[in-house]
Image: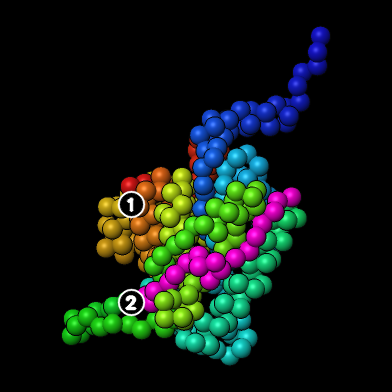
Amino acid sequence: MSAAPDPAMLAKAETLTEALPYLQRYAGKTFVVKYGGHAMGNPELARDFAEDVVLLKAVGINPVVVHGGGPQIGAMLKKLGVESAFVDGLRVTDAETARVAEMVLSGAINKELVAWIGQAGGRAVGISGKDGGFVTAEKVTRTTRDPDSNIEQAIDLGFVGEPKRIDRTILDTISASGMIPVVAPIGVGDDGHTYNINADTMAGAIAAAMGASRLFLLTDVMGVLDKSGRLLSDLDPAAIAALRADGTISGGMIPKLETCVTAVEAGVDAAVVLDGRVPHAMLLEIFTARGAGTLIRA
């Protein structure tokens, strides 16, 4: 008579069988993953994230990583004595701030993430939107309404851009060669200026251009929360508009959800906002029936 299977080993086998239909469903698909928040500064979480991305590539999914770096940019600006302000979650960016942002994003953060993926057994290539004519940016315009006069006024955010055109050639080339693109959210305008692009916005535009199956926004919260702090697991554009109107969502969550809505309306199957501080949160979302975070569909 054979010995009873080890419960721990049996649990691992059951986990793999639970993942099987998802592996079959997503084979050959593109996942765009925005990696950001304070989890980027935690070596253990960075290692977990790199392993997750390498696993996705190994099972036939094509991940494209777009990273943020807001806390790291803020720390460098503080170190250099450069002050900055935010409007609707976007950093007002003068010429000096733009130079610091590019230095931090395209330099230290991008190459560190490439190295983590390499240590996890994958091969990654770090690029920014300026490489190979990848992302052409245009200046972001924002308006605000004066509460006293009710007059709408334009806000100059400086060198803050958003993607105007995306040429996916470089991403296709990197992915087809078996490597993982790691993208810094920097672009160049038709005017020749360098623009700092919100990483969520960049990821959403890339997901739309790639016809991605999933857009993942890894951040510092478990997902979208209601006014009682409970997780909202499923949303659509109409529900998001209502949540913004009643003040449930604000600050940095506004551009995240704008990105999700734009992406799913452009053809991305679904977008997910989830907590990058939870180990392997992305795998839990992809390969389990329960999932994690907030799922947004059109």
Image coordinates of residue 42 in percent, x first then y, are 67, 63
Quadrant in which residue 161 is drawn: bottom left
In the rendered structure, which segment of residues is drawn in magenta? Answer: 121-140
Could you tell me the amino acid type at mark 1?
Glu
Which image quadrant is residue 110 in? bottom right
Q: Is residue 270 above or below residue 35?
A: above
- Residue 290 place in picture, x, y as percent: 50, 38
Marks 1,2: beta carbons within 8 A: no
| Residue at image coords 49%, 57% | 168
Q: Is residue 13 above or below residue 47?
A: above
Q: Is residue 280 left or right of residue 236?
A: right
Colour treatment of the image = rainbow
Residue at position x 28%, y 78% from top?
A: 144
Please provide percent x and percent y for residue 180: 62, 54
Tag 1 residue: 265
> Could you tell whether 198 is left or right of 27 in the image?
left
Q: Where is mark 2, residue-wise?
A: 141
Left or right position of 163 against 240? right
Crowding at label 1, few (<14), some or many (≥20) Cα neighbours within 10 Å?
some
Residue 31 appearing in the image: yes
- Of residues 17 and 225, the one nearer the viewer is 17
Asked if the stretch drawn in magenta spans residue 86, the answer is: no
* Residue that sits furthest to the top in the current view: 1
Residue sitting at the far bottom: 81
Label 1's element? helix
- Distance CA(mark 1)–CA(mark 2): 21 Å
Q: Residue at x 28, y 58 (%)?
A: 241
Category of crowding for the residue at label 2, using alpha-carbon neighbours closer than 10 angstroms: few (below 14), some (14–19), many (at least 20): few
Between discs 1 and 2, the one toward the N terminus: 2
